[in-house]
Amino acid sequence: MSKTYKITLLPGDGIGPEVVAEAVKVLDAVAGKAGFALEYDTRNAGGAAIDAHNDPMPDAVVDACKAADAVLLGAVGGPKWDHLTGRLRPESGLLKIRKELGAFANLRPVSVPASLAENSPLRPEKVAGLDLLTVRELTGGIYFGQPVGEEGEGDDRKAWNTMVYSVGEIKRVARVAFEWARKRRNKVTSVDKANVLAVSRLWRDTVKALHQAEYADVELDHMYIDNAAMQMVINPRQFDVILTGNIFGDILSDASATLGGSLGLLPSASVGGPVGLFEPVHGSAPDIAGQGKANPLAMILSVAMMLDALGEEAAAAAIRTGVDQVLDAGYRSGDLWREGNKLASTTQLGNLVRDAAVAAL
């Protein structure tokens, strides 16, 4: 009997529904060929949930996500909701669902095939063949630390956040990085600011101790965040797996995302709990929503990450092969188009990847 997976879909705002639709189209096609089945539960999130429920991530949506085998998220936010503050902001819903799912590790792969190296802001020879993975701690650090607050008036007004990590929090995300390195090129670069921050000294000491105790076979080096940001521009191909905390990972993974020339190619996964959350790196791009201009490839590649996590590696590999073949054939969305390429709509790209992925199985 074929396996049936329950997938909660959170299309969200802007181009989110469009790219999710293309990803589901590809997913359904490879599932039919690979011999597994899918059940979908579509829910509002972000701005769409604010409009419908006055809450960017209602508890009922959280419950639906927890009951699923995996969650696919499109994108949230847009100018319509920019005036909102605090827990009513669309983005606050993302923090809530990650926390509720126990998704403490964000995986963001960046690869630049030779066919796309010309799109990079760096020289093509600097990025052709790039393949790195950032493992970012996602539910701790300065974004969640307490106390946080603001007080005073005028020039005396001040605000504060707290960066805090425990040994246990550091160990669990470091294990994710070391395990992924063993499946890749066996190197981890741990990024911190141990020359200044006490919390970074704990981070570095904990990573070193875990490495010696459990992962001595993996190459480990350490880098300060400022140097890591510079190295990302000077020589990004030196990196295999980057391990870092929440705020540094936010900065570095966004910097690495520019290396391929477009956010429209970059998937991500937030994992650690029993249910993973898979989403493209890009935002909701409301200025092109509904025009067939959105690049669905990051969402489609996020589906491939989901299938890997579910144990459907052959289907995941077929999707990646399909994306590679479509790009190699010169098809591009507007964000990637260059003279000599074939401009394709959101739906056309989805159809091309679907057909190539099915053929690859």
Image (cartoon, rainbow, N blue to C red):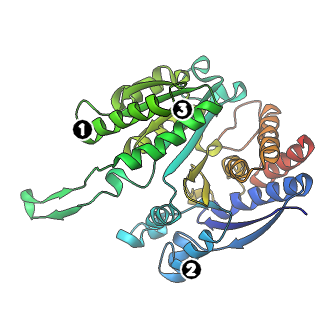
Of residues 300 and 16, the one nearer the viewer is 300
Residue receiving disc 3: 241
Q: Position of residue 193 (x, y in %)?
A: 30, 34
Q: CA distance from mark 2 to mark 1?
A: 40 Å
339 versus 351 height, above or below: above
| Amino acid type indicated by mark 2 | Ala
> Which of the 4 quarters of the picture holds residue 65?
bottom right
Graded by Cα atoms within 10 Å as few (under 14), some (14 to 19) or many (20 or more), the crowding at tag 1 reads few
Residue 41 coordinates in the image, percent (x, y): 70, 73
The residue lying toward the viewer, choosing from 322 and 135, is 135
Residue 131 appears in which quarter of the rendering? Answer: top right
Residue type indicated by callout 3:
Val
Query: Residue 106 location in percent, x, y?
Result: 52, 48
Residue situated in front as seen by the camera: 198 or 20: 198
> As drawn, is 84 to the left or to the right of 126?
left
Question: Which quadrant is home to the N terminus?
Answer: bottom right
Question: Which residue is pictured at 44% across the width and 28% down the height?
Answer: 212
Residue bearing mark 1:
197
Between the C-alphas of marks 3 and 2, the distance is: 36 Å
Q: Which residue has dot 2 on it?
A: 60
Q: Which of pointers 2 and 1 lies earlier in the amino acid sequence?
A: 2
Q: Residues within 10 Å of mark 3 (few under 14, many from 20)?
A: many
